[in-house]
Amino acid sequence: MEPTRSALRRLLGAAVEGSGIRPPESAAVAAPTVNIEVTRPQHAEHGDFATNLALKLARPLKRRPLEIADTLAEALRALPEAHEMLTDVDVAPPGFLNVRLSAVYLAQAVDAVRAAGPTFGRLRAEQPGRLNVEFVSANPTGPLHIGNARGAFVGDLVCRILEGAGHEVTREYYFNDSGTQVRMLGESVRALRDGDPPPKEGYRGEYVRQLADELPPELGERASHPGEDPALVLGEWASQRIRGGIEASLARLGVRFDVWRTETMIERDGWIEQALERLRSSGHLYEAEGATWFRSTAYGDDKDRVIRRSNGEYTYFGKDIGYLVEKFSRGFDRLIYLWGADHHGTVARLRNAAEAMGFDKAAVEVPLIAWVRFVREGREISMSKRAGEFITLDELLSEVGVDAARWFFAARSHNTGIDFDIELAKRQSNENPVYYVQYAHARIASILRKATEEGLQPATSLRGALADDTVGQGLAKQLLRLPEVIEDAADARETQGVTAYATELATTFHAYYRDRRVVDQADPETSARRLALVEATRITLANTLGLVGISAPEAM
């Protein structure tokens, strides 16, 4: 069944065409093109949905908004489909159009929810895209710690939302597999193996000691051969071991990646040189002081940026733009980089370089993820990978659980700094919002089991069952919000609207169950109708939780 808001947009478009308020396409004056916005009024007494379409059309048509709204209302009422879907079409100053859904439509829609089952809420995007989402990308010089956690959670959540909205998503992880950091890791492992202290700028901690203990003797021998770089040989081995641990930690969290890319691959396969050639042919590259520069000041930057140093080494910026070319070569419509807030200075120059190389600048998105402080009993937990002082992601998941951790990050905007209260996340009470929502699902599962035990089953259809049940209509309206919640979340690249919706739906259900006796052997017909609505609520709660990777328990 078509999502309610989408159906209303379509009907409003048909009302515009049928009302005669716009000039025909053949007229000398072009018909104004406007985006039809359908929103939910702040106050329920104003209706279920509202549109400001008449206000938008007023200026180009040079007509009063109220006059246009009256004309639109009349045209909307005349549509057969709208007549069945809506009970009220009202005009409110200065030109809003408010509509209310009919009980007939609500019953049909709830039947459609039950028929769709696990697929309810998932959309078919009007313009589906091939999207590449890069996230986490922590270098494999130590286990994933809770300082990296927000990137893992946010990236996975955004990917799930985009897929739910009908887009094709490729999850990508990019890391440095060579260079100074990897060599320093190898030197730290070698030092501990030989009983020496790690270098001053080296890595410390139990994980480095464990790597040193696990170092194969034959690898140590190879590292000592003439012509070998011992630190690099040991560092590459250690980083591969750490990467395996990172993959296992992410899998435990429910995060997967489709593609793993390394800096070595980007340089080895010539992608940076392709980027240089693109910039050179567009006149945005020049040589000075033995180095190769991008003319970034042409795009408002405070200074031009080095791509290749005088010693022939590529800068991080050079590797970034080479990687950008490589991504676009795979046919993606849009590149989404989820970076930490400390990368804010890099965003503009990356997007400017994309434009200079002939790509669509708007197709490069870089949402920045704000820092998170992890707090226990009111005190911040400090972390340092080099010092070996941190709480790993695995330790966090063992302590608070995957579901509680996922909810915490899904419920907050990624660009807002937050405190993660570990003790609160561990509590199984209504103070913990994920527990509250999961309990609603488990409660419904228990109700359905009890009904089966007493010989009661949900009605096959709710047709004609909601006409005199305003409380049931209210619950049905909440169910139908899920597709628009997903659409809005995908457009905003944010997930807090999904968790807010789940909480509101759980609250609405609890109120419904308080006010309506669902399992009643003395009135099996009424019970069957109410069980059907409750079953649709269970489906919707499960789908909403599943959208953000959280389990929907049958019992608690």
Image (cartoon, grey):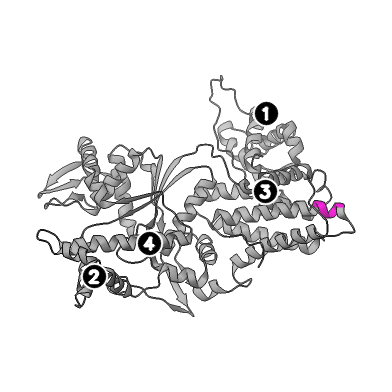
- What residue does disc 1 label? 19
- What residue does disc 2 label? 189
Highlighted magenta segment, given as a residue range? 525-529
Asked if marks 4 and 2 touch (Cβ < 8 Å), the reply is no
Residue type highlighted by circle 4? Ile
Answer with mark 4 or mark 2, whichever residue precedes in sequence: 2
Asked whether, in this view, residue 470 is left or right of residue 309, the answer is right
Which element carries disc 1, helix, strand or loop? helix
Answer with mark 4 or mark 3, whichever residue precedes in sequence: 4
Crowdedness near tag 4: few (<14), some (14–19) or many (≥20) residues, C-alpha within 10 Å: many
Asked if marks 1 and 2 touch (Cβ < 8 Å), the reply is no
Q: In this picture, is 446 found above or below 354?
A: below
Q: CA distance from mark 2 to mark 3?
A: 57 Å
Answer with mark 1 or mark 2, whichever residue precedes in sequence: 1
Say if residue 393 shows up in the picture.
yes
Crowdedness near tag 2: few (<14), some (14–19) or many (≥20) residues, C-alpha within 10 Å: many
Answer with mark 1 or mark 3, whichever residue precedes in sequence: 1
Q: CA distance from mark 1 to mark 3?
A: 29 Å
Q: CA distance from mark 1 to mark 2?
A: 76 Å
Q: Who is closer to the viewer here, 386 or 242? A: 242
Task: Estimate the x, y position of residue 450 in percent, counting from the top left.
Answer: 78, 62
| Prevailing secondary structure of the magenta residues | helix
Residue type highlighted by circle 1? Ser
Nearest to viewer (mark 1 / mark 4): 4
- Marker disc for residue 53: none
- Marker disc for residue 480: 3
Asked whether, in this view, residue 349 is left or right of residue 541, the answer is left
Q: Quadrant of the N terminus?
A: top right
